Image (cartoon, rainbow, N blue to C red):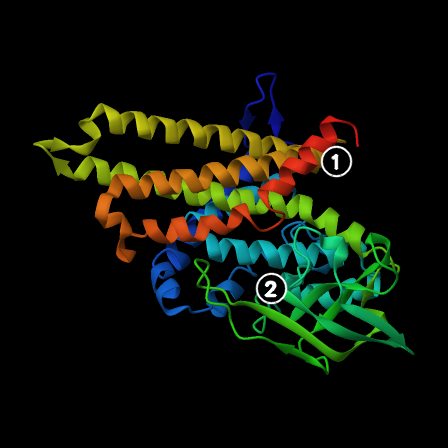
Amino acid sequence: MDAIVDTDANQFELNEDQRAIQDMARAFAADRVAPLALEWDQKRHFPADVIRETGPLGLGGIYVRDDVGGSALGRLDAVLVFEALSAACPGFSSFISIHNMAAWMIDSYGSQEQRERFLPKLTSMELLASYCLTEPGSGSDAAALKTRAVRDGDHYVLNGTKQFISGAGASDVYVCMVRTGDDGPKGISTLVVEKDAPGLSFGAAEKKMGWHMQPTGQVIFEDCRVPVANRLSDEGMGFRIAMAGLDGGRLNIAACSLGGAQSALDKALAYAGERKAFGQALDRFQALQFKLADMETDLAAMRQLLYTAAAKLDRKAPDASKWSAMAKRFVTDAGFNIANEALQIHGGYGYLHEYGIEKLVRDLRVHQILEGTNEIMRVIIARHLIGR
């Protein structure tokens, strides 16, 4: 695939392949996701059947190598996909993102045997994957995780709990960060835990503000036996794997915010042109025009920053982690604000479920928290600035 054009003005022009990827994702989202998104949200229904339909489109392993069924695309390509899907439903797009992050970890750090064992069924979406890092007592301080894996012959015995896991109980494969050594980041390893592992169970689905279409809950290990053959890379490599995965995960969740925010603006523009007050359409009032203008400007800035960060990660630029953090912080904050402004433009109707705006507000709010809170993003950016 040709590289993206990065001009002196730092503007992006997508090549023909990238436009085709974008169009494919938009068409699928419009046909299979958008018509059902509000129903899924209201009924808290996990649409595993529709999620699996993304496999034949190549969306089960977007940046997984093609020898195991992946699409072998870049991070910018992935951003285009998640932006397009999230215009229909940010929760749906976010689940596909998490699955892809788990698959990428196996592809990047697994042995050839592990890649051949897990990835063909993950890239086809025959199996769904979740990522397990957060625990009840460790969120932002991920290196403080307590889930313990003790070696017992050719197995590890796991005890502990993972918290806020998307797909808990619904996914088939869980890429888990566990403690095999001493306290701190160097004592963490990565295990692939299959759903039928003895001693694995799941907590009740959490009652959340948003993302109602995907289950979120605890993943519980009680003397859970996992083969040593399921460990990715060496013992002690887990924290490094987790942090590497989060750079891309942050871009993906920012893309989900971007698509959701674009949808919110589109809905606000349509409503403002149709709704009349004081004898004229709402979009005739200058105060509202200014609000729409600011939303459009923010969207342009969000897209530019996100695409730049994705291009840097694709070419492994030394400052890619900083740019991933900047994109995640700015795009998720601005995206939520745009959705909130769109609700305000709708007035009381924006508060009603059927208009789809209040769902966007609820869905986008969590993007400022997960994949590293936006406060942690500021810590990462500042550390790069002062040379730590």
Q: Which mark is residue 40?
A: none
Residue drawn at (67%, 37%) of the image: 379
Tell me where residue 173 appears, x and y as whole percent: 67, 69
Q: Amino acid at mark 1?
A: Lys
Residue nearest the viewer, comparing 226 with 8? 226
**SS label for mark 1:** loop
Specify whether residue 319 is in view.
no
Please state, as top left, top right, bottom left or bottom right, where the N terminus lies in the image.
Answer: top right
Is residue 34 shown left or right of residue 155?
A: left
The quarter of the picture where residue 32 lies is bottom left
Q: Amino acid at mark 2?
A: Ile
Q: Are marks 2 and 1 in contact (CB under 8 Å)?
A: no
Residue lying furthest bottom in this view? 198
**Residue named by callout 2:** 165
Q: Which mark is residue 316?
A: 1
The answer for how far apart the CA atoms under marks 2 and 1 are is 29 Å
Residue lying furthest front in this view? 137
Residue drawn at (68%, 48%) of the image: 246
Tell me where residue 74 appears, x and y as whole percent: 65, 42
Tell me where residue 247 appears, x and y as whole percent: 68, 43
Tell me where residue 357 appears, x and y as whole percent: 33, 49
Of labels 2 and 1, the one closer to you: 2
Specify whether residue 200 is in view.
yes
Please state, as top left, top right, bottom left or bottom right, where the C terminus lies in the image.
Answer: top right
Is residue 175 shown left or right of residue 332?
A: right
